[in-house]
Amino acid sequence: MYALASNYPNPFNPSTEIRFTLPEASAVSLVVYDVMGREVERLLDKTLGAGYHEARWDATGLPSGVYLYRIEAGSFAQTRRMTLLK
């Protein structure tokens, strides 16, 4: 089963871990957006094998606020919120 966990820690400063699970090898896109929907950083854009995966996001240099992260893998897509506090 595809799963996108909440980032940890949340709120965070300046970095956080984003964890997800893939039931099969899939092309994965993991992107961070600001609340206006603008892409801030593309963390992953490659094929990964089945299993548990982590991606670290370092927000050094970015302002405090709410950011969104979205995963797309196979037919699965999900978006979650995270908060950067400085």
Image (cartoon, rainbow, N blue to C red):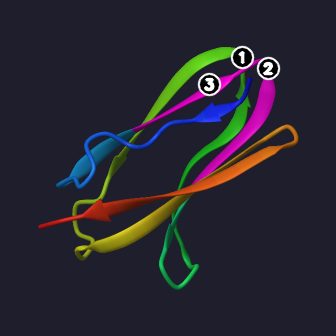
Residue 34 drawn at (x, y percent): 47, 75
Q: Using the image, determine if residue 26 lies above or below residue 64.
A: above
- Magenta span: 18-31
Quarter containing the N terminus: top right
Please name the amino acid that badge 3 sits on: Thr
Residue 21 badge: 3
Residue 75 drawn at (x, y percent): 88, 42
Furthest residue in direction right, as rendered? 75
Quarter containing the C terminus: bottom left
Instruction: State left or right for residue 55 relative to residue 48.
Output: left
**Magenta residues: mostly which secondary structure?**
strand
| The one of 57 and 69 positioned closer to us in this rendering | 69
Residue 49 badge: 1
Residue located beneath label 2 in the image: 25
Residue 29, magenta (yes or no)? yes
Mark 3 or mark 1, which has the lower sequence index?
3
Q: Using the image, determine if residue 21 lies above or below residue 29.
A: above
Residue 38, magenta (yes or no)? no
Dot 2: what SS?
loop
Dot 3: what SS?
strand
